[in-house]
Amino acid sequence: MNKKPVRRSSKQREAVMCAVEELNDHPTADMIFLKVRQSNPSVSLSTVYRNLGVLVEEGDLIAVKGPGSEVHYDYNVSNHCHIQCRICGKVSDIDFKPVEYVSMLPEQASGFHVDGVSVTFTGKCSQCLKSKKGVINEY
Amino acid sequence: MNKKPVRRSSKQREAVMCAVEELNDHPTADMIFLKVRQSNPSVSLSTVYRNLGVLVEEGDLIAVKGPGSEVHYDYNVSNHCHIQCRICGKVSDIDFKPVEYVSMLPEQASGFHVDGVSVTFTGKCSQCLKSKKGVINEY
DNA sequence: TTGCTATTCGGAACTATTCCTATTATAGGG
DNA sequence: CCCTATAATAGGAATAGTTCCGAATAGCAA
Protein backbone atom coordinates (compact mmCIF):
# COMPACT_ATOMS: atom_id res chain seq x y z
CA MET A 1 0.00 0.00 0.00
CA ASN A 2 3.04 2.25 -0.37
CA LYS A 3 3.17 3.45 3.25
CA LYS A 4 5.41 6.42 3.97
CA PRO A 5 8.82 5.73 5.51
CA VAL A 6 9.71 6.45 9.13
CA ARG A 7 11.54 9.77 9.17
CA ARG A 8 15.05 9.91 10.59
CA SER A 9 16.85 13.05 11.54
CA SER A 10 19.86 14.19 9.57
CA LYS A 11 22.31 17.05 9.72
CA GLN A 12 21.51 17.82 6.11
CA ARG A 13 17.78 18.13 6.66
CA GLU A 14 18.34 20.45 9.60
CA ALA A 15 20.73 22.51 7.52
CA VAL A 16 18.15 22.85 4.74
CA MET A 17 15.43 23.95 7.15
CA CYS A 18 17.83 26.37 8.78
CA ALA A 19 18.87 27.87 5.46
CA VAL A 20 15.26 28.57 4.47
CA GLU A 21 14.69 30.34 7.78
CA GLU A 22 17.90 32.32 7.62
CA LEU A 23 17.45 33.39 4.01
CA ASN A 24 14.01 34.54 5.11
CA ASP A 25 12.85 35.63 1.67
CA HIS A 26 11.23 32.73 -0.19
CA PRO A 27 14.46 31.27 -1.55
CA THR A 28 14.65 28.84 -4.45
CA ALA A 29 16.24 25.40 -4.23
CA ASP A 30 19.41 26.76 -5.72
CA MET A 31 19.68 29.61 -3.24
CA ILE A 32 19.12 27.15 -0.42
CA PHE A 33 21.77 24.87 -1.86
CA LEU A 34 24.32 27.68 -1.93
CA LYS A 35 23.45 28.73 1.62
CA VAL A 36 23.73 25.19 2.96
CA ARG A 37 27.07 24.76 1.18
CA GLN A 38 28.55 27.67 3.09
CA SER A 39 28.42 25.79 6.36
CA ASN A 40 28.30 22.27 5.00
CA PRO A 41 30.26 22.02 1.73
CA SER A 42 29.68 18.32 1.12
CA VAL A 43 25.89 18.53 0.81
CA SER A 44 24.67 17.70 -2.66
CA LEU A 45 21.96 19.42 -4.67
CA SER A 46 19.89 16.27 -4.81
CA THR A 47 19.93 16.12 -1.01
CA VAL A 48 18.59 19.65 -0.90
CA TYR A 49 15.78 18.78 -3.31
CA ARG A 50 14.90 15.57 -1.47
CA ASN A 51 14.77 17.32 1.88
CA LEU A 52 12.72 20.21 0.56
CA GLY A 53 10.27 17.60 -0.66
CA VAL A 54 10.21 15.90 2.72
CA LEU A 55 9.82 19.16 4.61
CA VAL A 56 6.93 20.21 2.39
CA GLU A 57 5.33 16.80 2.83
CA GLU A 58 5.68 17.07 6.61
CA GLY A 59 4.11 20.53 6.57
CA ASP A 60 7.22 22.37 7.74
CA LEU A 61 7.55 24.34 4.52
CA ILE A 62 5.28 25.62 1.78
CA ALA A 63 6.24 25.42 -1.89
CA VAL A 64 5.29 28.56 -3.82
CA LYS A 65 4.90 28.54 -7.57
CA GLY A 66 4.49 31.78 -9.45
CA PRO A 67 4.82 32.93 -13.03
CA GLY A 68 8.52 32.14 -13.03
CA SER A 69 9.82 28.64 -13.56
CA GLU A 70 11.43 28.04 -10.18
CA VAL A 71 9.75 26.90 -6.99
CA HIS A 72 10.19 29.15 -3.94
CA TYR A 73 10.05 27.86 -0.38
CA ASP A 74 8.41 29.52 2.60
CA TYR A 75 8.88 28.55 6.23
CA ASN A 76 5.81 30.56 7.15
CA VAL A 77 3.18 27.86 6.92
CA SER A 78 0.34 30.01 8.23
CA ASN A 79 -2.64 30.95 6.11
CA HIS A 80 -1.48 33.72 3.77
CA CYS A 81 -0.70 34.29 0.14
CA HIS A 82 2.01 35.65 -2.12
CA ILE A 83 2.93 38.19 -4.72
CA GLN A 84 5.67 37.67 -7.25
CA CYS A 85 7.47 40.27 -9.31
CA ARG A 86 7.20 39.55 -13.03
CA ILE A 87 10.60 41.00 -13.64
CA CYS A 88 13.01 39.83 -10.96
CA GLY A 89 10.92 36.92 -9.69
CA LYS A 90 11.01 38.10 -6.08
CA VAL A 91 8.28 36.64 -3.88
CA SER A 92 6.72 38.47 -0.93
CA ASP A 93 4.07 37.57 1.61
CA ILE A 94 0.67 39.18 1.60
CA ASP A 95 -1.38 39.12 4.76
CA PHE A 96 -4.58 37.85 3.22
CA LYS A 97 -6.30 34.61 4.18
CA PRO A 98 -7.33 32.74 1.07
CA VAL A 99 -8.38 29.64 2.98
CA GLU A 100 -11.60 31.37 3.92
CA TYR A 101 -12.65 30.82 0.34
CA VAL A 102 -11.94 27.12 0.23
CA SER A 103 -14.96 26.11 2.24
CA MET A 104 -17.13 28.21 -0.08
CA LEU A 105 -16.18 26.45 -3.22
CA PRO A 106 -16.21 22.68 -3.12
CA GLU A 107 -19.67 22.39 -4.58
CA GLN A 108 -18.85 24.66 -7.49
CA ALA A 109 -15.85 22.56 -8.33
CA SER A 110 -17.72 20.10 -10.49
CA GLY A 111 -16.99 16.86 -8.70
CA PHE A 112 -13.61 17.72 -7.25
CA HIS A 113 -12.74 17.13 -3.63
CA VAL A 114 -11.08 20.47 -2.89
CA ASP A 115 -8.16 20.43 -0.47
CA GLY A 116 -6.30 23.67 -1.05
CA VAL A 117 -6.09 27.06 -2.71
CA SER A 118 -3.12 28.99 -3.88
CA VAL A 119 -3.60 32.69 -4.43
CA THR A 120 -0.67 34.35 -6.11
CA PHE A 121 -0.67 37.97 -7.16
CA THR A 122 1.65 39.23 -9.83
CA GLY A 123 3.06 42.65 -10.35
CA LYS A 124 6.22 44.65 -10.32
CA CYS A 125 8.22 45.30 -7.19
CA SER A 126 9.33 48.79 -6.29
CA GLN A 127 12.91 48.18 -7.40
CA CYS A 128 11.92 46.87 -10.83
CA LEU A 129 9.45 49.71 -11.34
CA LYS A 130 12.46 52.02 -11.55
CA SER A 131 14.84 49.99 -13.67
CA LYS A 132 13.28 48.71 -16.89
CA LYS A 133 14.44 45.19 -17.45
CA GLY A 134 12.63 42.55 -19.47
CA VAL A 135 9.75 40.64 -18.02
CA ILE A 136 10.46 37.08 -16.94
CA ASN A 137 7.07 35.79 -17.93
CA GLU A 138 4.15 37.70 -19.35
CA TYR A 139 0.76 36.22 -18.57
CA MET B 1 14.20 50.16 -26.54
CA ASN B 2 13.18 46.60 -27.49
CA LYS B 3 9.84 47.47 -29.09
CA LYS B 4 7.53 44.57 -29.82
CA PRO B 5 7.41 43.29 -33.41
CA VAL B 6 4.48 43.85 -35.76
CA ARG B 7 2.41 40.67 -35.76
CA ARG B 8 1.86 38.84 -39.01
CA SER B 9 -0.73 36.16 -39.54
CA SER B 10 0.38 32.60 -40.11
CA LYS B 11 -1.33 29.31 -40.80
CA GLN B 12 0.56 27.81 -37.88
CA ARG B 13 -0.62 30.41 -35.38
CA GLU B 14 -4.21 29.94 -36.48
CA ALA B 15 -3.80 26.18 -36.18
CA VAL B 16 -2.50 26.53 -32.63
CA MET B 17 -5.37 28.77 -31.59
CA CYS B 18 -7.84 26.40 -33.24
CA ALA B 19 -6.37 23.39 -31.48
CA VAL B 20 -6.74 25.00 -28.06
CA GLU B 21 -10.37 25.78 -28.79
CA GLU B 22 -11.13 22.34 -30.17
CA LEU B 23 -9.41 20.46 -27.37
CA ASN B 24 -11.52 22.61 -25.06
CA ASP B 25 -10.05 21.29 -21.83
CA HIS B 26 -6.98 23.28 -20.80
CA PRO B 27 -4.52 21.36 -22.94
CA THR B 28 -0.77 21.40 -22.44
CA ALA B 29 1.72 22.44 -25.10
CA ASP B 30 2.31 18.82 -25.98
CA MET B 31 -1.37 18.03 -26.42
CA ILE B 32 -1.73 21.10 -28.62
CA PHE B 33 1.29 20.01 -30.63
CA LEU B 34 -0.22 16.57 -31.25
CA LYS B 35 -3.56 18.08 -32.23
CA VAL B 36 -2.01 20.56 -34.64
CA ARG B 37 0.06 17.78 -36.18
CA GLN B 38 -3.08 15.87 -37.13
CA SER B 39 -4.11 18.47 -39.66
CA ASN B 40 -0.73 20.04 -40.24
CA PRO B 41 2.06 17.46 -39.91
CA SER B 42 4.95 19.78 -40.69
CA VAL B 43 4.44 22.10 -37.71
CA SER B 44 7.28 21.92 -35.22
CA LEU B 45 7.08 21.89 -31.46
CA SER B 46 9.03 25.12 -31.20
CA THR B 47 6.47 26.80 -33.43
CA VAL B 48 3.74 25.68 -31.06
CA TYR B 49 5.59 27.07 -28.06
CA ARG B 50 6.40 30.33 -29.79
CA ASN B 51 2.81 30.85 -30.86
CA LEU B 52 1.41 29.96 -27.47
CA GLY B 53 3.69 32.63 -26.09
CA VAL B 54 2.51 35.15 -28.67
CA LEU B 55 -1.15 34.33 -28.12
CA VAL B 56 -0.79 34.71 -24.36
CA GLU B 57 1.03 37.99 -24.86
CA GLU B 58 -1.75 39.25 -27.14
CA GLY B 59 -4.38 38.24 -24.57
CA ASP B 60 -5.99 35.56 -26.73
CA LEU B 61 -5.05 32.78 -24.32
CA ILE B 62 -4.37 32.38 -20.62
CA ALA B 63 -1.52 30.26 -19.31
CA VAL B 64 -2.46 28.24 -16.25
CA LYS B 65 0.15 26.86 -13.87
CA GLY B 66 -0.88 24.46 -11.18
CA PRO B 67 0.87 22.03 -8.87
CA GLY B 68 2.01 19.93 -11.82
CA SER B 69 5.00 20.91 -13.91
CA GLU B 70 3.29 21.60 -17.22
CA VAL B 71 1.59 24.80 -18.33
CA HIS B 72 -2.03 24.49 -19.42
CA TYR B 73 -3.66 26.88 -21.88
CA ASP B 74 -7.17 28.30 -21.71
CA TYR B 75 -8.95 30.12 -24.52
CA ASN B 76 -11.49 31.41 -22.01
CA VAL B 77 -9.88 34.72 -21.12
CA SER B 78 -12.75 35.93 -18.96
CA ASN B 79 -12.39 36.49 -15.24
CA HIS B 80 -12.50 33.08 -13.60
CA CYS B 81 -10.21 30.64 -11.85
CA HIS B 82 -9.12 27.03 -11.94
CA ILE B 83 -8.91 23.79 -10.05
CA GLN B 84 -6.34 21.15 -10.79
CA CYS B 85 -6.40 17.49 -9.79
CA ARG B 86 -3.33 16.52 -7.78
CA ILE B 87 -3.36 13.07 -9.27
CA CYS B 88 -4.06 13.24 -12.98
CA GLY B 89 -3.28 16.93 -13.44
CA LYS B 90 -6.62 17.71 -15.07
CA VAL B 91 -7.58 21.39 -14.98
CA SER B 92 -11.17 22.64 -14.79
CA ASP B 93 -12.74 26.06 -14.72
CA ILE B 94 -14.41 27.43 -11.63
CA ASP B 95 -16.90 30.21 -11.99
CA PHE B 96 -15.48 32.51 -9.37
CA LYS B 97 -14.19 36.00 -10.04
CA PRO B 98 -10.85 36.52 -8.34
CA VAL B 99 -10.25 39.87 -9.96
CA GLU B 100 -12.65 41.43 -7.50
CA TYR B 101 -9.93 40.98 -4.94
CA VAL B 102 -7.16 42.60 -6.94
CA SER B 103 -8.28 46.13 -6.39
CA MET B 104 -8.45 45.45 -2.67
CA LEU B 105 -4.87 44.49 -2.31
CA PRO B 106 -2.33 46.77 -3.94
CA GLU B 107 -1.65 48.75 -0.81
CA GLN B 108 -0.99 45.65 1.24
CA ALA B 109 1.49 44.44 -1.29
CA SER B 110 4.44 46.30 0.17
CA GLY B 111 5.50 48.44 -2.76
CA PHE B 112 4.39 46.20 -5.57
CA HIS B 113 2.38 47.46 -8.50
CA VAL B 114 -0.21 44.64 -8.66
CA ASP B 115 -1.42 43.67 -12.12
CA GLY B 116 -2.94 40.22 -11.73
CA VAL B 117 -4.05 37.38 -9.50
CA SER B 118 -4.07 33.71 -10.12
CA VAL B 119 -6.33 31.64 -7.91
CA THR B 120 -5.85 27.93 -8.31
CA PHE B 121 -7.61 25.36 -6.20
CA THR B 122 -6.23 21.88 -5.80
CA GLY B 123 -8.02 18.66 -5.07
CA LYS B 124 -8.94 15.34 -6.50
CA CYS B 125 -11.26 14.92 -9.43
CA SER B 126 -14.14 12.48 -9.28
CA GLN B 127 -12.38 9.90 -11.45
CA CYS B 128 -9.21 9.90 -9.35
CA LEU B 129 -11.19 9.71 -6.10
CA LYS B 130 -12.18 6.19 -7.16
CA SER B 131 -8.92 4.84 -8.52
CA LYS B 132 -6.01 5.28 -6.10
CA LYS B 133 -2.98 6.30 -8.05
CA GLY B 134 -0.01 8.25 -6.71
CA VAL B 135 -0.14 11.96 -6.29
CA ILE B 136 1.67 14.01 -8.92
CA ASN B 137 2.74 16.68 -6.49
CA GLU B 138 2.04 16.95 -2.79
CA TYR B 139 2.02 20.47 -1.43
C1' DT C 1 8.13 43.25 -57.62
C1' DT C 2 11.17 44.40 -54.05
C1' DG C 3 12.86 44.77 -49.50
C1' DC C 4 12.26 44.28 -44.76
C1' DT C 5 11.67 41.37 -41.15
C1' DA C 6 8.35 38.17 -38.75
C1' DT C 7 7.87 33.41 -38.87
C1' DT C 8 9.13 28.73 -39.71
C1' DC C 9 11.48 24.03 -39.11
C1' DG C 10 14.53 21.07 -36.89
C1' DG C 11 17.47 20.17 -33.72
C1' DA C 12 20.67 21.59 -30.15
C1' DA C 13 20.93 23.70 -25.73
C1' DC C 14 19.25 24.91 -21.34
C1' DT C 15 17.16 24.70 -16.67
C1' DA C 16 14.95 22.88 -12.95
C1' DT C 17 14.18 18.76 -11.06
C1' DT C 18 14.22 13.70 -10.38
C1' DC C 19 16.36 9.32 -10.55
C1' DC C 20 20.10 5.91 -9.79
C1' DT C 21 23.69 3.35 -7.26
C1' DA C 22 26.92 2.34 -4.05
C1' DT C 23 27.90 3.89 0.55
C1' DT C 24 26.91 5.80 5.17
C1' DA C 25 24.10 6.99 9.16
C1' DT C 26 20.19 6.42 12.26
C1' DA C 27 17.14 4.24 15.50
C1' DG C 28 15.07 0.44 17.73
C1' DG C 29 15.74 -3.93 19.54
C1' DG C 30 18.53 -7.70 21.77
C1' DC D 1 27.12 -1.74 23.24
C1' DC D 2 26.34 -4.18 19.00
C1' DC D 3 23.13 -5.76 15.13
C1' DT D 4 20.04 -5.17 11.75
C1' DA D 5 16.85 -2.95 8.79
C1' DT D 6 16.34 0.70 6.10
C1' DA D 7 16.36 5.92 5.68
C1' DA D 8 19.46 9.18 3.95
C1' DT D 9 23.55 10.56 1.44
C1' DA D 10 26.90 12.26 -2.52
C1' DG D 11 27.59 12.63 -7.05
C1' DG D 12 26.46 12.21 -11.35
C1' DA D 13 23.37 10.70 -15.11
C1' DA D 14 18.87 11.20 -16.89
C1' DT D 15 14.53 13.48 -17.77
C1' DA D 16 10.90 16.87 -18.95
C1' DG D 17 9.48 20.99 -20.37
C1' DT D 18 10.79 24.76 -22.64
C1' DT D 19 13.76 28.09 -25.10
C1' DC D 20 17.18 29.23 -28.36
C1' DC D 21 19.61 29.22 -32.90
C1' DG D 22 20.44 29.66 -37.92
C1' DA D 23 19.28 29.18 -42.42
C1' DA D 24 15.21 29.18 -45.29
C1' DT D 25 10.47 30.92 -46.11
C1' DA D 26 6.54 33.85 -46.18
C1' DG D 27 3.59 38.11 -45.16
C1' DC D 28 2.97 42.73 -46.00
C1' DA D 29 3.82 47.66 -47.20
C1' DA D 30 5.64 50.56 -50.73
Image (cartoon, coloured by chain):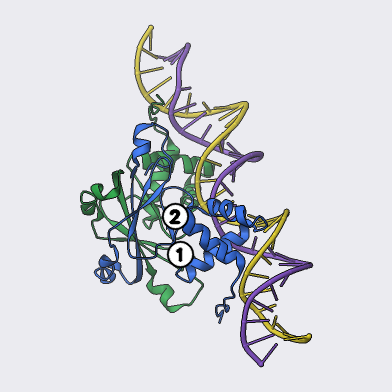
Chain colours: A green, B blue, C yellow, D purple
Q: Are marks 2 and 1 on the same chain?
A: yes
Q: Nearer the viewer, residue B48 or C23?
A: B48
Q: Position of residue A125 (x, y in %)?
A: 38, 70
The amino acid pointed to by label 2 is Asn
Circle 1: element type = loop
Between circles 2 and 1, the one closer to the viewer is 2
Q: Is residue B49 left or right of residue A66?
A: right
Q: Nearer the viewer, residue B79 or A9?
A: B79
Badge 1, how many Cα within 10 Å: few under 14, some, many 20+? Answer: many
Q: Which residue is mark 2?
A: B24
Which quarter shows the N terminus of chain A?
top left
Q: Nearer the viewer, residue A137 or A55?
A: A137
Q: Is residue D2 left or right of residue A55?
A: right
The amino acid pointed to by label 1 is Leu
Look at the image and tell me whether residue A64 can be seen: yes
Q: Quadrant of residue A89?
A: bottom left
Q: Is residue B45 above or below residue B136?
A: below
**Given the image, what chain letter belongs to the residue carrying mark 2?**
B
Q: Residue at x 62, y 59 (%)?
A: B46
Look at the image and tell me whether residue A70 can be seen: no
Q: Is residue B1 above or below residue A126?
A: below
Q: Quadrant of residue C7?
A: bottom right
**Given the image, what chain letter belongs to the residue carrying mark 1?**
B
Mark 2 and mark 1 in contact? Answer it, CB < 8 Å: no
Which quarter shows the C terminus of chain A?
bottom left
Q: Which residue is mark 1?
A: B61
Q: Position of residue A50 (x, y in %)?
A: 47, 39
Q: Position of residue C26 (x, y in %)?
A: 41, 27
